[in-house]
Amino acid sequence: MDQKCSNLTTELKSTSCGSTLRDRFSLGCHGGAKMAAQAYAMGRREINQHFNIRNAKLLAISFVLVLTAGHGIHRSYGGGDTCDWLLSSGRFLGENVWQPHGCMMHKYKISEVKSCLMNKYITFVGDSRIRQLFYSFIKIINSGIKEEGNKHENISFEDRSTSLKVDFLWYPEVNNSMKNCFKAWTERDQLKPHLIVVGAATWSIKIHNGSMEALTQYKINLTSITPLLEKLAETNDIYWVLQDPVYEDLLSENRKMITNQRIGLYNDVTLSILNSSTRNMAAKVKILRASKLVAEETIAGSLDGLHLPETTRDINAMILMNSYCNKIVKPIDGSCCLPQPHLSVIQKLTGCFFIICIMSCMVVTYFCHSWRKSKPSTDVESGEEKKPATASLSNPEKLLLSLSKLGLIMGYFYLCDRANLFMKEQKYYTHSTFFIPLVYIIVLGVFYNDNTKETTVLNREQTDEWKGWMQLIILIYHISGASTFLPVYMHVRVLVAAYLFQTGYGHFSYFWKSGEYGISRICQILFRLNFLVVVLCLVMDRPYQFYYFVPLVTFWFMVIYVTLGIWPQTGKKDENGSCSPYWEVVLKLLGLFLCICLLATSQSSFENAFSVWPISKLFEWQGFLHEWWFRWKLDRFAVLHGMVFALLYGALKKGHLLSESKGETLFAPRLSSLLLFTSVVVFLTYSIWCASCKNKTECNELHPYFSVLQILSFILIRNIPGYVRSVYSSFFAWFGKISLELFICQYHIWLAADTKGILVLIPGNPVLNIIVSTFIFVLVAHEISQITNDLVQIAIPKDNYIALKRLLCVAIFLLGILTLSTVEQLNK
């Protein structure tokens, strides 16, 4: 519109109408633009007035209640058994990646299989296709097994290290011979199989040329065999494998009578007989329908049209393994047939505490009228709530309300990732699942922008923006399973290093400027970092190291505090009002660098430093310190880099070598151009190196040394141009303010099975499910952030002496929790 006005104004200049018409037209054009801007602002205010954070949270609560009720009803009355889901339905996520309906299938390792099947006797009974399944099953135990020998005879396999025996019994027809085999097992107590897998029909179709008489006889024989199977099922697991389809075009002439239509008739008879059992569910024969669904998608890859491709058989064998072993091994990423875990003593105590808080809050709200009702005003521009100038609640009331809300939120966490209520699915990476959402958030981030209050390097708005877009990328990375794609993995490793870089930069800058090392300051930081994680450890029964980023940031904060706080304290003003000289700070940073290098040279020395109880209890994962060593070593220099950058930035600023005024380049024009060009080259070079890296081990070894280059390149690109430095994305900054809560909450209410899978609130529609679950997840993180901010003001006093006493009380409480956890673990 402004361009049109400019063109028309130029034309008017050449006319004889004079300046009066030109001025009036110009005024009308610019007046129209102003009216359009006002209309846009009014529309934005109208939208934000009705859809603000408070209303969004109410909508999220409605979603949670409806979805919880819906899934609860489905579980209770709609066949919500994950074992049935595993055996009966599913779909392919990608090539050879099978996704059972509503649950996750674990990929078993040899050690896990041997642990599950120790001292077991397993029998496969049936025709050549059951023999194929037998071989795929034992190959999970011993991958070197070859399919050799006479195909039409019994085959035996033994693993002496685990006293495991697996037999294949050649019974290609459902007849009296098969019946006698089952009858013999029912009449003896010893040498009875713990697991029996049965299936046969194609041989009957073949030798009887597909006659209906053969189908009738099959029905009679199966009817007589079913009571024997059900008797065996009272103490053992019995699986009947439905007949897989064939690829009729590839069948040889002597198999042409084996059509999918006839196979369907046999399957219908099998289902009608086995499903009509009047016996109790515990004695019911389990029907493996999923193999038929898998074969329908893959039978075209068959060599002869009858026998399944090896990859298909492997999927069926893994389905069987999950159905039988999940209740024994209890893999975290195998939610099918996984029983609900028993509550620990700590979980029970935590649940009782939150229940008491919730009930007390309800009683106080109902009977006591001391609550002063004050409606918070709403900033319609941002959609955020403004707290009243005077607090309407006393500290005890605030504490009770905050803990009650937190208890309800923790209940949702437990339902999502511990109770067998909501569905879970596996991750499967494709480029589109990562890059398409990435494009969306970039567009939104660029669209919602605003001017910064300050134009200094790494100002508050800019660091919030930085945290925000990094966190959003990490979330997309986790839910898409992009860790399998090495270039994305390495770039996300840089984002984690950048978080630690900001930790070093931010805390160093604070201590350098303020010189404040009081206990109150320590308690505030430790509380904000660890409060949510400690609560989740208690509620979800997970070790502290499970949420690896928080222990890492906490450790480095204490390192920064000790390094700068030891005599002479960095930033402490002397009697002349001057700070510590730079050489003292440089010596401290050099000493820290040497300590890091020494610890990094020996894993055993590092682990010995953290092997003393109760420190070991905090940093162990599954009984070992290797995970903590890996996380620490991977980004061991990132915090130091941030501290050094903060020191250099302060020195340059003090020497008036930076131009941080609005619109000005950071350095002299030529130097700014050179640094900007160099930064872009380095940034792109690092990305090219990530793409050429061969494996994670090689990349991780070089990552601690190279990651700082991309971080510094980004900082320079973001801050050298004056205009770029003076604006920021309000969209990214909003997420940046709750980035810690987003990172932690994703473990249980966005992802599932401790980040191994994806939470499914709305089955059958992946896009809608992601939208709804993300909406709830983000608002829960925002609410937890507000609860944490409220509690830190109540729990952490400004008086250092009182803060120290409360810190000691918390330390004693945590020591008691660790002791109880250790005792309970030893008694298992």
Image (cartoon, rainbow, N blue to C red):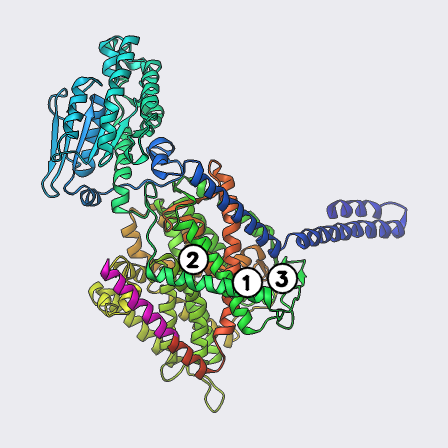
Distance CA(mark 1)–CA(mark 2): 29 Å
Which numbered disc, 1 or 2, marks the residue that appears first in the sequence? 1
Residue 205 visible from this viewpoint: yes
Query: Residue at coordinates 51% horizontally, 53% vertically from top-left?
Result: 778
Q: How many marks?
A: 3
Amino acid residing under circle 2: Ile
**Left or right position of 390 against 125:** right
Query: Residue at coordinates 38% horizontally, 57% vertically from top-left?
Result: 540
Q: Nearer the viewer, mark 3 or mark 1?
A: 1
Q: How many other residues sit within 10 Å of disc 2, few (<14), some (14-19) or many (≥20)?
A: some
Determine which of the numbered discs, if any, sits on residue 744 in the image: 2
Which numbered disc, 2 or 3, marks the residue that appears first in the sequence? 3
Image spot of residue 203 (x, y percent): 23, 15
* Residue at disc 2, secondary structure: helix
Image spot of residue 651 (x, y percent): 46, 75
Q: Main secondary structure of the magenta part?
A: helix
**Left or right position of 9 against 330:** right
Amino acid residing under circle 3: Glu
* Residue at disc 3, secondary structure: strand
Amino acid residing under circle 1: Met
Which residues, given as a range, are shown in magenta? 810-828
Q: Quadrant of the C terminus?
A: bottom left
State the residue position of label 1: 362
Query: Residue at coordinates 47% horizontally, 60% vertically from top-left?
Result: 407
Quarter-wise, where is residue 246 in the image?
top left
State the residue position of label 3: 385
Q: How many other residues sit within 10 Å of disc 1, few (<14), some (14-19) or many (≥20)?
A: some
User: Taking 562 as reference, is 637 above or below it?
Assistant: above
Q: Nearer the viewer, residue 435 or 74?
A: 74
Distance CA(mark 3)–CA(mark 1): 24 Å
Question: Residue 787: within the magenta?
Answer: no
